[in-house]
Image: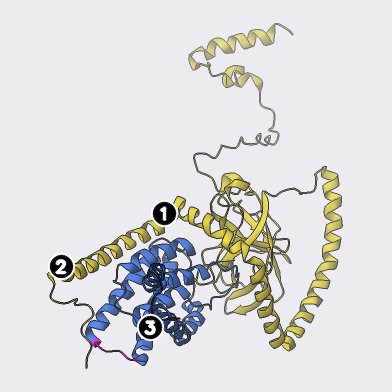
Chain colours: A blue, B yellow
Amino acid sequence: MSRIAGSETEVVIGDLRRRYVPLISTIFAMLLGLLPVVNSSLWVPDLAFLVLVTWRLVRPEIWQAQVALGLGLLADLISGAPLGQSMLLWTLVFLGLDYADYLLGVRDYWLDWTLATAAILFHTAGVWYIALLMGAKVSVLVMLPQLILSILAYPLVARLVLRLDRWRLAR
Amino acid sequence: MAPPSKRRPGFSRRAQYGVFIGYLVAVAGCLIAVLLLAIAIIDPKGFQALRTAAMDVTAPISNAGRSVAGFFSGIGDSIGDYWRAGSQNAELRAELETARRELHSRQALEYENRRLHALLGLAQETGDEVTSARIVSSSFQSPRRFATLAAGSGSGVTAGMPVRSSDGLIGRVLETGRWASRVLLITDGASNVPVRLVRDGTPAMAVGRGDGSIELRTLEVGQNPFRRGDVLVTSGAGGIFPPNIPVAVVTGQAGERAIAQPIADPGRLDFAIVQPIHQPAADGDLNAARPVTPAAPVPAPPQPAQPQAQRPAQQNDPRYQPALQQQAGQNQAQTQAVPR
């Protein structure tokens, strides 16, 4: 890739890439939930949430908390979850991470993972409780495989997002 | 060096207000989301148009990738089968034993059934389906167990209809879009299916556990009549599921409750059959349900004959008036007197 843009179009494309790669990658992760997989037990991590939280931890400055509202609404519509579930949980996670940034200042990789773990714990508990309110009396143990796999999947997703971020900002 | 605070965009008042308004929007949005959730809990059918429209848009995506995923899930299954080969072999052998025994008794029953049907002049129940369609995806990232069916109201599917495969019951339709509908699988925590034990007809409730298994609850307290390998079929109680669709096989006990596995594995099957609601009045609006004309009353056992003169003939007549009884009695006496 040449360092100097050859034409106006290249500048526009670079600008679009810089702006929209985080958004599009998150929406792509949502669409992965539409994969025609029919399995009867719960162990696949909620990829959209994982990608969203990773982007938020890697690049705190690109999204304000209200972005999670719109993305949450989209996720609810795509996944068929009760409307408001992801809107509420994702926005609360963003607000919590904003507060954590305010308290902590500098983060390193391990602190990122810890924060992601806290966010995943909160999200899993929230999803379980909302399912309970909706009439699905499901044991908490059902959520356990997904919870553990989500926490373990964070480093992988973080590497993926970092690579995307490098590509996004490449000149 | 500590990086500058990312949340404080500098000394510009305008930029600071922007951040503040952002937080205001986020908090207000959270409140709206809580409201939406409350609506979803109180009235699950709220915003149905929006939700089903989204389903209509997304179902074709799943449908297109169905064959690819079938390939991948096949790989997963074969790896799992390889790991569990030993225990599975013993399990399958035991299952085969019981199945063979059941087959023999079933053949006898089938013969008897056919004979009785012929006696009653009843046709075999066939053609009893609204439509058949592919199951294209499921909510594999959430604790709820929904599946998406590639047929909607355009094919005559309405909410509440039972969905089955050739193996057994899959679930029931929860909401329908134009071209797709959402199915509540029998393994979902909110699914209750009235079943009965094939062996002795004990009624029970099959409640999903959310992890792919089903819990069986008897209607009598302190009893656990289920044994490993027992087969459960729908009982037809409640009027939504037609009777005698295979539902689950008992796989084990957990204390007082029995755990079963569904017979129809929605991950394996390609096509599902949507059937009409067994007794439509069971799922309909209370006011829409028509009163059923009661059957003629059973005639009372014969009473010992009473003297006719004591009871005027007009007693059943709505125009009967006690004041005229005297006169009527006289008339009756006359009518009785005259012909003799």
Q: Residue B209, can we see it?
A: yes
Magenta-span inclusion, residue B231: no
Q: Which residues are drawn in magenta? A: A104-108
Q: Which mark is residue B43?
A: 1
Which one is in front in this view, the residue at disc 2 or the one at disc 1?
2
Q: Main secondary structure of the magenta part?
A: loop
Chain letter of disc 3 in the image? A
Mark 3 and mark 2, same subunit?
A: no
Residue type pointed to by label 1: Asp
Residue B159: x %, y % from top left: 55, 51
Q: CA distance from mark 3 to mark 2?
A: 32 Å
Mark 2 and mark 1, same subunit?
A: yes
Q: Which mark is residue A116?
A: 3
Residue that carries the numbered disc 2 in the rendered image: B14
Q: CA distance from mark 3 to mark 1?
A: 33 Å
The reply to whether discs 2 and 1 touch (Cβ–Cβ < 8 Å) is no
Magenta-span inclusion, residue A106: yes
Residue at point 54%, 40% (across, down): B289
Within the image, what quadrant is residue B171 found in? bottom right
Please rate how many residues cluster around mark 1, counting C-alpha atoms within 10 Å: few if below 14, some from 14 to 19, many from 20. few
